[in-house]
Amino acid sequence: MPHLLGSAYLLGAGPDHLNNIYEAESKGLEPWHDSPGELSSYDWRDHLGNPKYQRAYLDFFEDELVLNGYDWHKVLDEYLLKGKEPLINNLISGLGHPLIHLGYAYELSSRELAMESLTMAASSYNYMHKYLDNPSYTKPSATSTHSPFEILCRVQNDSRFDGLFTHQGFDNLEPLFEKREDDVLEYWNSWQISDPTKEFQASQMAAAALLVATHKPGGKPYDFFIVHLLTTSHAVRILLPLLPTNIHVPLVRQWWLLTLAVYIAQLRPEAVLTSVTDYDRKGRDWGWVDEQAVQGKHALDAHYVKALRAMKTAAETWGDGDEFYLKAAVKFTDEFDGWGGFGHSVF
């Protein structure tokens, strides 16, 4: 709910539409369930990755917020950034929702969202943290490049991933690392980040391309899992200027690991850039896109609205002289008719 409310608000939605969002989104919320026990500063890491402790984690972090005089930045500094294996290195768990939530916490200056993002990171903590926490997984690559899109094209054509899965879906992620860890990490290490600003700009274009340029009109619906690569990229863009500099490259590389994993899990759809660059936007501009996001027939779809806003803010951040982001947003709006890519997943 807060993602859609925040996105719509930042796109200029009025109070009536925000109320409509609240009414629609609140109907699908699940009730809280009591945790098996409480947590303290002495044992809070003992139940990382256990969703049954979600309520306990929220209670714990909110108590810490009070003890720190409601300074949520201090709480984040203590529980997100510090320690031998800090939570910051696993924000891509849960399909990146802790990362997305943290981005909105900073955008909206919300201590409530900040504590919820910590809760998400703690309760969905998983195996992917080790690739950031353990430096042995980061190795020089013989096929390095500054272009993430170039690497994705190599992945798309890599026969080592052929026949690995029979269906798309979130449930492919863990088996991917069990079966092809070395191959995934080979591509993960191939992205050479020597100019973080320039390379991150390229990654935002790649994220938009993965969502929009892989979609064929009249074909399957837009991919629900791939859209998270765009919205997590947006969150990284928000966080980079606000977090310590030593976090910047690891955070971007964390996003890159999620991107590679999701792309392979979704059976590596081909991204045809000309489907975006040659798209006829018929005179429609960002004002029209904003109108579709807050007044169109899909204005109550959180991921649809978040995707449009992510593309708009990327254009504002980097410039859009060739109108790539604008054309991508118009194409996405024209063709969107729900989400697919679920396979056998229940998410």
Image (cartoon, rainbow, N blue to C red):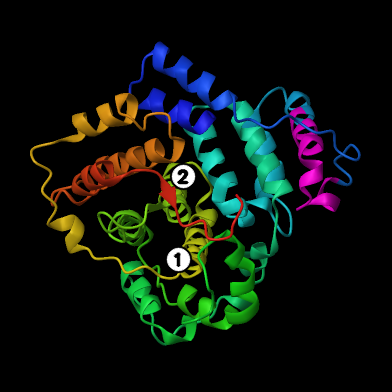
Residue found 35% across the figure and 63% down from its top? 195
Does 90 appear above or below 286?
A: below
Q: Is residue 54 a member of the stretch shown in magenta?
A: yes
Along the polypeptide, which appears first: circle 1 or circle 2? Answer: 2
Task: Tell me which residue sits at (27%, 54%) in the image.
Answer: 218
| Kind of residue indicated by mark 1 | Tyr
> Which region is colored magenta?
44-62
Q: Position of residue 164 (x, y in %)?
A: 53, 79
Quadrant for the N terminus, please.
top right
Which residue lies under the disc numbered 2? 235
Direction right: furthest residue: 37
Residue 300 point in image, percent of width and height: 42, 29
Q: In the drawing, does residue 313 fall left or right of residue 81?
A: left
Which label was assigned to residue 263?
A: 1
Mark 2 nearby-residue class (10 Å; few <14, some 14–19, many ≥20)? many
* Image coords of residue 65 (percent x, y): 73, 28
